């Protein structure tokens, strides 16, 4: 590996690690705030004072815990999404030597995760992009470049999100950018939604193939960075601490206490 390649890889790793630490700290802070005794009591009081929940017997501490866990799951999903949305933009800008602010263009009123025009990059890089598209999408990149949307998972639960993705496919086709949709989790995709967006013009690359695509296109495999021992150790430590904080929190302690009293 050349000195410039090593510097590029080191910069990507540092930025990725900084984002990872930011979000890990954010999860720990959310648990500390949301699962506190004060917040648990506030949530319970709101349920008990509501006109609907008491009628269905959901004005109880157990349901507060369900609500808090649901919000935590959403927070984890959002922060993972930010990691997989934002870091590849930096990677693309560094790999193809283009300004980072031009990598995520606005298409009408929607922001594209990554947009690369062949005219922006060198001739060898343009050929490289075309070869990667043909290899993974199974069709030649006819047009002026590539437009990439990135999801760590794909489980759209509202029609508005699907409409936006359909609209984006149309905007990319109008701009002569080949639409590629990367989904890194292999267990999440909804086949009917993928079929709809495929008809709209997207080429989906899912699971391990999405990792391979990004690795070959950008020369950096984020999965490999996550597999490095020191980073895995840090992630394991922080996530274990996250769950320790959650299951020893006032919210959990209160529910266990109440259920124990009921069973005696």
Image (spheres, rainbow, N blue to C red):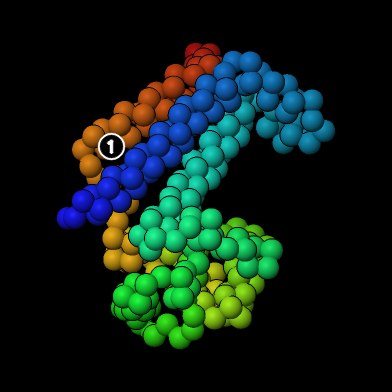
Q: Nearer the viewer, residue 31 or 21?
A: 21
SS state under label 1: helix
Depth order, front residue of 16/208: 16
User: What residue is at 28 percent from the left and 45 percent from the top?
Assistant: 10
* Residue 45 seen in the current view: yes
Instruction: Give percent across and percent down for residue 127.
Output: 33, 78
Vertical relation: 100 (above or below) 20? below
Please give the count of numbered marks on the rendered protein.
Answer: 1
Q: Residue furthest left?
A: 1
- Name which quarter of the figure residue 242 lies in: top left
Location of the N terminus by quadrant is: bottom left
Image-based side of 15 in relation to 41, left or right: left
Q: Report x, y in % for residue 201.
A: 53, 79
Residue shown at 68% from the left, 32% from the top = 58
Residue 184 is at least partly visible in this image: no
Would you place residue 236 above or below residue 39 in this image?
below
Residue 7 point in image, percent of width and height? 27, 48
**In which quadrant of the rendered view does residue 126 lie?**
bottom left
Look at 51% across and 25% down and name the residue there: 29
Report the residue marked by disc 1.
231
Q: Which residue, as the protein is rendered here, is positioned at the far right? A: 51
Q: Quadrant of residue 247?
A: top left
Residue 228 lies, in percent from the top left, at 23, 42
């Amino acid at each position: 590996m050349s000195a410039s390649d090593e510097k590029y890889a080191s910069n990507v790793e540092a930025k990725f690690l900084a984002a990872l630490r930011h979000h890990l700290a954010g999860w720990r802070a959310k648990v500390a705030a949301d699962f506190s005794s004060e917040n648990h009591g506030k949530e319970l009081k709101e349920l008990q004072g509501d006109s609907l929940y008491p009628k269905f017997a959901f004005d109880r501490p157990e349901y507060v815990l369900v609500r808090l866990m649901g919000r935590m799951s959403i927070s984890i999903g959002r922060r993972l999404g930010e990691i997989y949305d934002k870091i590849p933009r930096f990677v693309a800008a560094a790999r193809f030597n283009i300004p980072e602010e031009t990598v995520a263009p606005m298409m009408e009123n929607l922001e594209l995760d990554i947009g690369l025009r062949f005219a922006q990059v060198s001739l060898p890089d343009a050929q490289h992009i075309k070869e990667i598209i043909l290899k993974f999408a199974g069709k030649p990149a006819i047009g002026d470049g590539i437009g990439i949307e990135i999801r760590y998972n794909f489980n759209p639960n509202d029609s508005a999100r699907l409409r936006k993705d359909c609209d984006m496919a149309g905007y990319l086709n109008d701009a002569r950018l080949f639409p590629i949709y990367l989904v890194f989790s292999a267990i999440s995709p909804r086949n009917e939604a993928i079929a709809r967006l495929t008809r709209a013009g997207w080429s989906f690359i899912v699971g391990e193939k999405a990792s391979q695509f990004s690795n070959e296109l950008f020369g950096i495999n984020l999965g490999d960075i996550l597999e490095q021992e020191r980073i895995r150790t840090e992630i394991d430590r922080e996530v274990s601490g996250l769950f320790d904080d959650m299951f020893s929190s006032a919210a959990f302690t209160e529910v266990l206490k109440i259920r124990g009293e009921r069973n005696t």
